[in-house]
Structure formats: C-alpha cells, structure tokens
Amino acid sequence: MRFTFNWLKRHLETDWDIYQIAQKLTTLGLEVDDFCDPKVMFRNFKLARIEHVEQHPNADKLKLCVVADAHGKKWRIICGAGNVHKGLTGILALPGAIIPRSGDVLSHSKIRGVESEGMLCSYDELSMPSDGNDGIIDLGPDINLSMSVGDALGFDGGILDVSITPNRGDCFSLKGIARDLAAAGVGKFVVPDDISSKSSFEFPLHINYEKSDACSCYAPVIAFRVIRGIKNGQSPDWLRSLFRAVGMNSISSVVDLANLWLMDSGRPLHVYDLNKINGQLTIRFAKNKEKFFDIKGQEYVLHQDMLVAADEKNVLCLLGVMGGSRTACDENTTDILLESGLFDPIFVSRTGTFLDITSDSRTRFERGIDRDSCVAGLETVTRAIIDVCGGTASNICIVGTHPKVDRSIQLTKEKLDSLSGYEIDWSTAKKILLKLGLKELSSSGEVSTFLVPSWRSDLGIEEDLIEEILRITGYDNVPEKKIDTQLEGDNTILQQENTLMAIKRLLASCGLSEVVSYSFIKSTYADAFKEKKKVIQLLNSISEDLSTMRPSLIPGLILAAIRSLNYGQSHVELCESGNVFYGACMQETHIAGLRAGDFQDRSWIQSHRKINVFDAKSDLMTALGYFGISEKDVTIKQEAPSYYHPSRSGTVYLGKKKIGHFGELHPKINKLFAVSEIVACFELIIENCDVSPNNIPYNHKVFPKINRDFSFIFDSSVAIGPILASIYKIDKKIVKADVFDSFELENARKSIGIAVTLDAVDRTLTEDEAQVISERIIKFVEEAGGELRKK
Amino acid sequence: MSELDKLLASCLFEIASCDDLQKLDQIRGAVFGKNGKITDMLKGLKDLSAAEKREVGAKINAVKDSVNGHLNAKAVELEIKQQEKRLASEFIDVTMPTPPRPNGTIHPLTKVMEEVAGIMSSYGFVLADGPDIESEYYNFTTLNMPDHHPARTMHDTFYTNMCADEHGRKLLRTHTSPVQTHAMLAHKPPFRFFAMGRVFRSDYDATHTPMFNQVECIMVDKDVSFANLKWFIADFLKNFFSAPNLSVRFRPSFFPFTEPSAEVDMNYEIKDGKVVFGSGDKWLEIGGAGMVHPNVLRYGNVDPSVYQGFAFGFGLERMTSLKYGVPDLRDYFESNERWRNRFGFNYVAR
C-alpha cells in the first residue's frame, strides 16, 4: 500500500509527523517498507520556468536553457529532452540533489564544453510513472512557481509504503490503517459520512442471478447501479498527480475514481461500459473452456467452477478477480454499470491462482473485505463519479442477500494474562477492542463477549483478540520472563546428528572438506545414479538442473569438485552428509566422500601419484572407525553400483547389511560430467551402521607380542581380503593380519606378504604356541590356494 | 730418565697427537696388546725378586693407569669430534617447504547447527526431526493453512511426482514447522522441541536459493507465555551471537500457525566497517515467532484449553551470515575452494 500522508490524514486527525507515524505503523505490524519526506527528498530541487532556449553550440540534440525560480534567480541548464520550450515550468535539480532513480548526487558538469548548472528532471528520473511522457516534467502554465516541489508533484505531506500481512484485508485501505493508528492513540479516526445519491431513473438492466447454492455461497450479494450521461476522459489534475505520486497509472476518470475508492476504503468495484453489454447480464459459472479476455486483451480459458458476469454473447468479468476488455470504459463511454459484490475469498483465490492473475481486487477479496460495504461503496463512488464526470444515477439493484455472520468472541482476563505472561489492565484492554470497532455484547466480571465488526474477518478466536490487545499496547511493553531450565528428554536424534557431525570432522581431519549441495539435481545425473530405483521428480522445478531428487550424494560432490578442478586445482577432496531420495517415499541418510586428481599437492618429499580406489576405501574405513568398525568386522565384496568402475570398486557389508560402497568412478560418469581427472568416491549408509559397542577384554599389564611374516604365492584372481578375515578366525590370539608386500609374478600369479601379530593379552606367549599358530595359518592359506614361498 | 719414564712420555706424546679412533686403538694395542710394551714389562717382572717386584710393579702399574686414563679421555674426545663431523655432514635445508598434511574444513552451516544444538540443549530442548518430502497435510493443514489459504501461495512450493495419499500430495517441505506436529503427535505435553534442517521454496535470486535451512523451536506447557517467548529468544540470540547486551524487538506480524505472531529484530550498529550486534539502534530482522495457534495444538493432539506454547523459526544461513560474515547466500550450496578456505572451519574448531 503506497499512499500520501495527507490522504491518510483525511481519515485521521493527528498532529504526529510522518516520521512518528512511520515508526508507529511498524510497531503495529503494518511494516513500513519505505517512506519519504518530500522536504528531505527534494532538498536541492526547485520549481523553475524556462526563460530562454537556444541551440547548444557543439551538439545538435542539446539545448541551452536559462531557467528562473520564483525569486528570479537564474541558472544555465543543458537539456536534451524533446519537449523543451520557453515558458515550460518543470523541476530543476541543482548540484547536491540526489536523483531518486539512480541514487546519484548531481554535480556541476560540462556537457560538450558548456557548463550546466543543474538538470531539468523527467518523471522517470524521479522514479514516478511517466504515463508515456518521455520528456522533462511539464507542470503546466498555471503552476505557482513558489510552490514546494513536493506539493507540485502531489507528494502531499510525504509518501508511505506499507506492506500488509495477508490476514489484514481491512488494512489494504487508508481507512483501515487510520483506524489502527487511532486505536493506538495516534489521533482521532474520522468516521466517514453516510452518502446516498438520489435515483433519477429506474435501474434499466435485467440481472440473472442463478440462485444455486454455489452461487449464493461464492457471491452471496452483488449491488448494481447505472449512471447515465457521464463524460469520461482524462482524470482531473489532482487525481492524476496523486496517482503519479503513489506510483499508480491513471486510466480514465471513472476507472481512476473506482481505484481511488478501492485504495481509500478497501472496497473493489467494477465499472462496465453499459452500452457494450449485449442484452441481459447473467451471474453464472463459466462454461468449460469458455474464453475470457482481460482488460489488456489477454485471453484466458476458464473452467466451470469460476464465477463470471456475462452478457448474452460473452464473458465480461471474472468476478472479484479481473474485468474484461469487452466492456472496458474509454473516452466515448457515456453510460456505465457499477458492480459492487461480495465474493468468497477461497473462490477468488482459487480462480486467481489457477489463471495466474493478480489484481488489486483479488488481493482484497482473498484477504477478506468489509462484508457490509457493497452498498456504501457503490454510493461513495457514485457521488465521486457524478462530481467529476457528471451524469445521473439509477436506483441500486441488489441481487442475493447479505449474509448475516455476526461473529462474537469471548475474552477472559485469565487467558489474556496467561497467554501474554503479564497483567494487563482489563479496562485498557477492552478499550482497545472498542476502538478497533468491536462491540461489547455482554460483560460479567473479567469475562466479556465482543461482536466482531464486518471488516475484521481475520478475528475468530480469543487468541486473535489477545493479539490485538498486545499489538496495540505494543509488543515492546511485554516484559521478558525467564523460563526454567530443565534437562530431561530423549536425545536420540541429537545423538544421531552428533554422529554425522563427528564423522564429518573425522573425514575433514583426513583432508575432506565438507560441502552442502542442493537436494535436487539434473535428471540425467539422477538417472546415472538411480540404479534400479525410481527417482522422485519435481513437478514445478526451477530449472532442469534442479529438477530431480538426488538418489545419491555423489553427483553433488562431483559438481562441487568441478568448481575446483576447472579453476586450476590439481586435486580436490570433499564430503557431504544428507538425505538421498528414491522409490515410494524413501529417504536415507548418507555420508559420501570424493577425491579427484592428484593425491595431495605434489611435494619434494614424496613421490607423486594420482588418487585411486584405496584412497576411497581408506576414507570409508576411517568413517566406519567412528562406530568402532574395522576391516576385520566387515565383509568386502568386489561389487558396486554401476556408476563405479566395475573392477575397481567394492561394497562393504556388516553382517548381511550393506553399509557402504567405494571405488573409482566409471568412465561413463567422468564423461557425463566432463571430468577428465580420476575420481574415487565412497558412500556410507548411516542407518545401517547400528552397532553395539564390542567389549574387548582389557588387561592393564602389557606383554610382548610376537610378529610373524609369511610369503605366499597365489593366482592373481584370488581375493586376499577374505583370506585375511579368515586368518583372524583361526585363533583369538591373532590380533592383527595385514599385507606388508604385494607384487605380480609371471603366469598370472602374485606374491603376497602377510604379517601376523600374536598377543595372548593376559600372559607372554611361548615360542611353541606361536609355532603351532603359524603352522595353522600356513595350512589354512595353502588350503585357500596359497603356496608358501621357500626362503 | 728411566726406560719407564721414556715409555710414558712417548705414549702420552703419541696419544696427544692422535686424531683418529683407529690410530688410538693401534696405540692401545702397541702398549697393552699381547706383545705390547707394558705387557712385555709386566711379563719381565717374574724374573725379579719379591722386593724389586713390588717396587717395579708399582711403577709399571702407575704408568699403565696413566696411559689408560689418557687413552680413554682421548677416545671420548675423538668420538665427540667424529659425531660432530657426521652431524655436520647430515645438513638439511629446513627452509624447504613444509610437506603437505591433510586439512579439510567443516561447512559453516554445520558449525552453526552444532552451536544452535548446544544452546537449545542447555535449555532442555530436545532435537526432533521429520522428512524432507512431506505431505500437504503436515506441511500446511496441520499448521492451520487449510486449502486455498492465501498463505499457501506465499510458500512457493515444490510438488513431487509421487502419488498422493490420504495426507494429500507429496511436496518438499517449505518450512521445518511440520516437525512440530510430528513431535507433538509422538509425545505427551509438556514438551520442548527444536528441529533443524533443509527447507525448499521455489525462489532463486541474489537473496533466495531454492533450498535453505531453518531452525524451529516449540515449547508447550500450561502457562508458557508471550513474555517467556520474548525472554527465550533474547537469551538464545545473546548466547548465539555472544552479545550479552543484545536487544531484541518484536513486531506484530502474521503467520497462520501462531497467534499472536511476531517478527523478531535484533539491534546492531556498524563500527569501523564491521557489524556489531547488541549496540546501536539499527534493527535487523532475524526470524518469526509467536504463540502456537490452538488449531496447531489440536492437530498435534494437544488440548488447547489446557496447554499453550510458543514457537519460532529462524533461517540458519542468515544466522550464519550474520555471525561469520558470509556474504552471498548462493555460495553456501555452490562453494568453491576459495570459499571453503575462507568460511569453512578447521575440523577441531568448536
């Protein structure tokens, strides 16, 4: 809502200035987005008249003007506008002026070698609608040069721009805003006079109003009136200047007056050119696929639960939402039909949403207008139109009936005090409600029942009244009251969250930097990672790049990696935790990591290598370490989803549960993302890592361990991991089995050096015992396909 | 000069002029070895009388001890010299660059979530959670936004291609508030919950990303009041921003799920080009709050005639940006190396 301060003052007698009002509005919940004091805004601006015009010596399109203010002070100005002429009175900006459009401070300048001491402004430069006037502002010959710039431009005490919350339909009007301010002690609310125009002739049109339930539900009452013999043309200067100041476009007198009233009282009206209506007017539901052309001629295809006003040929108006072009008023309009209806908020909202039409009318109906304003609105606009455009009015024709929805709400002091948390004076509280227009129906002790006024459809329950009282008293006046601290409750979810955070810190200690990626990705990326699962798509995504719920965290990590690799990083290491989505309604929490390119920075101290599958495996095992899971607790299978390199990837099982994957990425993925560097990734499925802590016996005495190394020859195809895992099972005293050496031999065979550590934990192991275990290890490995190398 | 004296003098001379451990060993051999000079002299004692034996033997022993002492001292001296020489030869240029060590960073949002969880827990609030893909019922209806409520259009909602069920169409939650309902349904009042996580709205420009994170908080009991809400938010923000003097301003506003509703501002000023919270008279919006609407309590199976409560929701990116000076919202989700190095946290930072 953008309006002038003096317009507001027509509804509010107050001595507060615009600054005080702006501050008060914000504390009332009517947030002031912007306000301007013309005295400040137009500092260094003046009204000036062009006294002399001549050609710029060095530029064809520029004019050299001499302008003078009311005191005869003169300036030399260079101006390039087409409408420059002697005698024009415009707005002169002098050095130091801040030009509203650009925010720049004007200074002396030389244009093509000639000094210009200021600038004659256009409406556009002042951030005002130009109404098609491209040139400099021409205030007309009758303007008094000694007027202030603000007054000359219709700023009328200043401009306020207030954003209205969706519940406050009543404050989409000057009247509503004034009422709120008055209730908060800012002066006196001016109650408008009742207006009625005498009817000069019988309402001439036949209105068909389908008396179906739906019709009376969506449009319970509509009032009509015809005015004949008007002269519709450009609006008077005061109205155009007001509209320009608040940024509204002036169309024609009748339309502007209807819009003025809409702003003033929040009551939307529609004006039809009576002579363009073919026959009778019918209020009915649209036919399926029926067409409607809005005021700008844009076509809409309607469907059958939209309510329209139609003549015998066409749909003329989408009731409560938008008027049509077929009966639009123009300069030839002489007779008009005014329509002032009550339309259901949900119905208007649904129609507007479906057709994607926003309008001042929709905004107000959606939020709830004054239910009793149909006739009063019609009367006020009739008077305004007759005053400006002449003409005579018919009687008012009303179809439907005014719904009686007297809503009363009980308020108890007990609830008021309890919800607000402090004691509010009961009579003060009641006075606030009365000032807002509520009526006290009954009262007994500290319980009162109030009748809600017709314009406050947002008030329905006791809490609403409490909000009104707190709002008007000022939220600032509510004291702060401590809550007691209690420490109990089930913090399982916090522990899960802490687990994720701890693992990410662990991974960061290994060099992986955490990123946060969008939960949605490009559908081709999602398809490459969905495996056999169904991906979830957005029906109304912002772009194709953000259209599909990610079935894996890896695509997001690759995209993040690309942002580093493409800018000269030779390697990148990332991790992320978050949900992945697929199937019917599946949401799974994963942690994933990615390394690409070099293994660390190249350095003089170590040989340079690329990352590989084992870097990913190490990262995954490090993460699993948080749960106390080590390699000997899991089974690793040479298998993985298809986005991994088929023979350089693995899946980790904890018992039968799949807990993660690791591996180098499949080249097809590199190709899809256009990544040339080698990429190795892992994914960890958090939910499946549910392990109870294992209770390894502890002995504080330390005994010497015995280390034994064995060298075996295997066929290259033999998987070593399961053999190591089985070695642990040979004897409890085998506390470590690891590969210390591995190299390929001829004939598809490989040499594997296995180091085993033996520890009895509670005593020193004897050589004989170690020998027995060693022999069992050799026997087992030989059965598994190994051949002990002779020294 | 006796022969013995001569021997001693020549030995001491040789030892003193020796500059090598090996040579020193040769000297030792020449004196004390199998055919060494002193060994020979000692052998010659057997031919002497008892009295001479005692006298000569004592002299030889004195020379022996003296030579031995000098040999040992020289050996220590030479060993030190030798080690010094070796160490000098082991010179390394320690000004060479430090070898790389892994050094990953934690995303600032994660850090802030940890901080928020810490503060919330200290007041006895329990973390609750809910799915990112919600139904219309939980995202809107239970939060007092019935069908065609204008507020539904304010949330530019992403809908999915999943089949609708008895709870309506499936969508990406537009706020963390549905967690309130899930948590209320799963517990008996009184309770204190908070939730953190991703929310989604169809908006993308310099100040909006289609995904962002919220923290949500709800406290329900028989006498929880608006005054409690004011204290709690102020205390929470004072803790979070480490600004004990922070002032918090409540402005009336509208949310379908709270009544009364408020927008929350905190004060700040700009000192030496830096934002300082808790001083000055400029105000900055931080989030929305209010008393839980009775309908929301009913949907959570809580009797509003017995219980009342407060709730609030703040944007985590906004809190992070304000606290740690992260400039552009989009970088949170499209970070590059430089951003991570500048705004990420070391993995031990708490």
Image (cartoon, coloured by chain):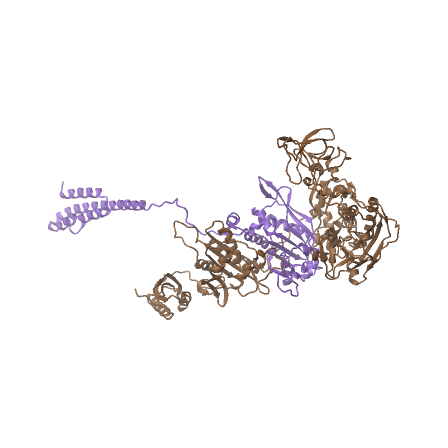
In the image shown, does B129 or B84 lie closer to the viewer? Answer: B129
Indicate whether A433 appears above or below A13: below
Q: Residue furthest bottom?
A: A783
Q: Is residue A151 left or right of residue A714?
A: right
* Residue name at image x 28 percent, y 44 percent: B81
State the hue of chain B.
Answer: purple
Q: Quadrant of the C terminus of chain A?
A: bottom left
Expressed as whole percent of the image width and height from the top left, the position of residue A579 reads 56, 59
| Most foreground residue, A301 or A376 | A301
Which chain shows up in brown? A
Q: Relative to A389, is A717 above or below? A: below
Q: Is residue A680 left or right of residue A482?
A: left
Which residue sits furthest front? Answer: A60
Q: Residue A423: x, y in percent?
A: 72, 50
- On the image, the x and y values in percent for residue A668 come to 49, 60
Question: In front: A665, or A27?
Answer: A665
Q: Is residue A40 visible?
A: yes
Q: Position of residue A562 (x, y in %)?
A: 50, 53
Q: Quadrant of residue A442?
A: bottom right
The answer to which of A98 and A265 lies nearer the viewer is A98
Residue A61 position (above or below residue A351): above
Q: Quadrant of residue B120?
A: bottom right
Q: Is residue A703 visible?
A: no
